[in-house]
Amino acid sequence: MTTTARELYDQYAELHEQYKSQARQLEIALAECIGERGVLKASVSARAKEPLELFKKQLRKKYSDPWSECADIIGARVIVGTSSERSEVVASLRNSKVLEVVEVENQEEQSDPSVIRYRGLHAHITSDAVRRPDGTLLQCEVQIRTAAQHAWAETEHRYIYKKGEVPDAVRRHFNRLLVLMELFDLQLEEGVAMARELDGFRRLELSQYLEVTVNHLTHAPSDAQLTMDVIEQVEAAGLGSAVELRALVEVYMRENLEEVLSVIDEYGPQSDSHDVTSGWITTQGELILVLALLDRDEYQLSNALAGSDLFDPVERLAMATGRIGFLRN
């Protein structure tokens, strides 16, 4: 027997706050999963449908089991820079320990390549954090787009999507825009590949990794140029290349996350003892770089930073973590 739209509305409206909370948990899980894969600047969002939206959709679709058949009761969207990063997002979902991929719908593989149309990439996933009213897992849809694809999809939806018959002249005009979108993504992919060969790109990657990782822990604004300045200072002091420093920090974070959280709790932007003059570094990506270098060799780091503006804020971190070898004699 088909669930009526009103029955679904009443049931869902009663649980809506719970589903909004589940959507927030899904968003966090997706961001962590994708970040671990190295897709650092992805925009991740998730939302639970509004009760009235679901009511109207059930009026149209007449699902016999809307909890199974409506794929986007809780939906998410991941927007990345390049086409290759879309594949990285899918790979990160497949490798996740907290998310399970039920199906990947890749319209590039399923559609006629001679036809000009937007080809979406959707992953249908489940998470222990998202469940139906009966306690079973609720399947969620994740849209994965490049920024250019997202701009196109929003434009099409606003002006011509599901608006009845579209005259050929109008359709051709929008098709030309679609071709430009595909060319943009292709050129961007090639440009990024060339940029990766430049000396400074590894510093940029390290800076972004540090920024995203710390921001996830503090939710405080950071200054990317400050982080780049610290990376360059550390490299100039002979403490390692950007690639070596990235590897050092990744190992440190796996083995010492509790230490990082303790420092943030004690001296970070939300702590009672936070002082912006000496504690600004706890809001910056370089926090975990400095902690990793202290952990490796506090004496070497002390010599490298002696006389620099960075010495005093790092000295406080050294005291907080018991790396007294860093302190001045």
Image (cartoon, rainbow, N blue to C red):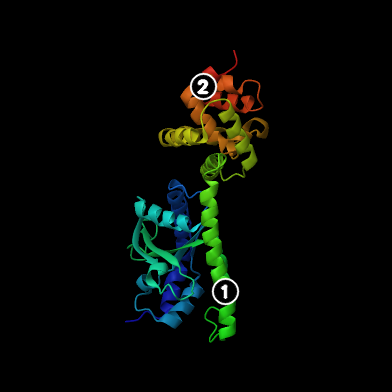
In the image, which is nearer the foreground, mark 1 or mark 2?
1
Does residue 70 appear in this view? Answer: yes
For badge 1, the amino acid type reads Arg
Sooner in the amino-acid sequence: mark 1 or mark 2: 1
In percent of the image, x 55 and y 83: which residue is there?
163
SS for dot 2: helix
Q: Residue 298 carries which label?
A: 2
Q: Which of 208 and 50 is in front in this view?
A: 208
SS for dot 1: helix
For badge 2, the amino acid type reads Glu
Which quadrant: the N terminus? Answer: bottom left
133 left or right, relative to 327: left
Residue 59 coordinates in the image, percent (x, y): 45, 82
Residue 72 coordinates in the image, percent (x, y): 44, 68
Tell me the residue that label 1 is attached to.
176
170 left or right, relative to 16: right
In percent of the image, x 44 and y 54: which residue is there?
30
Compared to residue 258, the image places residue 296 above or below, namely above
Q: Which of 201 and 28 is in front in this view?
A: 201
Quadrant in the rendering for residue 250? top left
- Mark 1: give few (<14), some (14-19) or many (20+) Cα within 10 Å: few
